[in-house]
Image: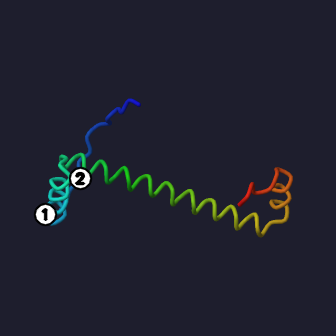
Amino acid sequence: MECVMASPLSIRLDERLRTDLEQEATARGIPLSQLIRDLLETGAKSARRDRIRRDSARVARYVAATPSAQALFEEAGGTHGA
């Protein structure tokens, strides 16, 4: 898989946060920029999973409360083991 870098992003860090991040980057043996990219990627993936879970729960609540939605699920084969 090819990774294409986007344009640079400028962020402001207070001294305490920057020091903490630099220490963590040093402990991992990676540059500060790589640590920040890794943390942002992990956070973005987590946020996406959380959003999917919230949306799924919202759909489940709707189906549970709506007879026509329940009928549609049954017609489509149910919840497939959920």
Question: Which mark identifies residue 44?
Answer: none
> Which residue carries the number 1 mark?
15
Give me the C-alpha separation between circle 1 and circle 2. Answer: 13 Å
In this rendering, the answer to whether 60 lies above or below 42 is: below
Circle nearer the viewer, 1 or 2: 1
Nearer the observer, 81 or 12: 81
- Image location of residue 37, percent across then percent down: 29, 48
Helix, strand or loop status at disc 2: loop
Check the image and name the residue furthest to the top.
2
- Image location of residue 44, percent across then percent down: 41, 53
How many neighbours does mark 2 have within 10 angstroms: few (below 14), some (14-19), or many (20 or more)? few
Question: Which mark identifies residue 11?
Answer: 2
Name which residue lies at 24% across and 46% down: 34
- Image location of residue 3, percent across then percent down: 36, 33
How many neighbours does mark 1 have within 10 angstroms: few (below 14), some (14-19), or many (20 or more)? few
Helix, strand or loop status at disc 1: helix
In this rendering, the answer to whether 55 lies above or below 61 is: above
Q: Amino acid at mark 1?
A: Glu
Name which residue lies at 41% across and 31% down: 1
- Image location of residue 54, percent across then percent down: 58, 63
Q: Amino acid at mark 2?
A: Ile
Q: Quadrant of the C terminus?
A: bottom right
Q: Is residue 40 left or right of residue 25?
A: right
What is the quadrant of residue 80 in the picture? bottom right
What is the quadrant of residue 58 in the picture? bottom right
Name which residue lies at 76% across and 63% down: 63
Check the image and name the residue furthest to the bottom.
65
